[in-house]
Image (spheres, rainbow, N blue to C red):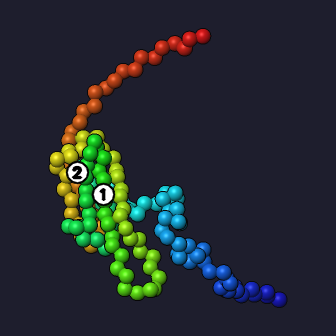
Amino acid sequence: MNDVVAPQHHRPSWPEVSEFFSGLPQWATLRPLFGTHPIKVEDDITDGKYELQAEIPGVDPDKDVQITVRNGVLTIRAERSEKKESNGRSEFAYGSFTRSVTLPTGADEDGIKASYDKGILRVAVPLKEVEAPEKHIPVGAAES
C-alpha cells in the first residue's frame, strides 16, 4: 500500500510581518540598525582606477544628486521626492539619502568623474602610483 501525502497550502490568518510594518513611518522600522543602506553600491579597482556604482533610481542627477570628497572620503547625497497621486501602497523609499566610502590610497581627488544612466551613478577615481616605504619594527624582549 502506498501512502501519498499531498502538500497542503494554506494562507495564514495573520498578514505577513512586512505588511504590518508598512503602515509605520520609515524611521519606525529601524532599517539602518539591520545593516542596510538606502544607497546600495558596488566597487572595484581595475586598470589603475577605483570605480564605484551606486543604485539611485528615480532621481534627476542634475538636481537631486550631490557628490563631495573630503579627506579621502567620497560622499554621495541624493534626494527622492514623493509624488502623492494615489492612496495605494508604496514601498518606495523617499527623502534624503547619504552614502560615504573611504577612497583607496593614492586616489586622485582632482580627477574624479561621475555619470548617471538608468538609475545607476558611476564614479571613476584615478589612482596614482604610491610606493609605501617599508617600515621595520623592532622586536624587544618581554620584561619579566
Identify which residue is drawn at 36% across, 62% down. Answer: 97
- Tell whether label 1 touches label 2 (CB within 8 Å): no
Which quadrant: the N terminus? bottom right
Query: Where, by quadrant of the figure, is residue 37 drawn?
Result: bottom left
Residue 140, x across and y down, in percent: 48, 14
**Image quadrant in which the C terminus is located:** top right
Q: Toward the viewer: 87 or 114?
A: 87
Mark on residue 76?
1
- Residue 39: image tag: none
Above or below, 74 against 3 in this view is above
Q: Amino acid at mark 1?
A: Ile
- Helix, strand or loop under label 2: strand
Q: How would you rate the neighbour count of disc 2 (Cα within 10 Å): few for under 14, some for 14-19, many for 20 or more?
A: many
Percent coordinates x, y for residue 106 in the rendering: 24, 40
Instruction: Tell me if 96 is positioned left or right of 11 in this view.
Output: left
Residue 47 in view (yes/no) = no
Q: CA distance from mark 2 to mark 1?
A: 14 Å
Residue 17 visible in the current orientation? yes
**Residue 128: x percent and y percent?**
20, 41
Q: x, y percentage for residue 143? A: 56, 11
Vertical arrangement, residue 61 with respect to residue 2, above or below? above
Q: Which residue is mark 2?
A: 125
Q: Is residue 36 left or right of residue 39?
A: right
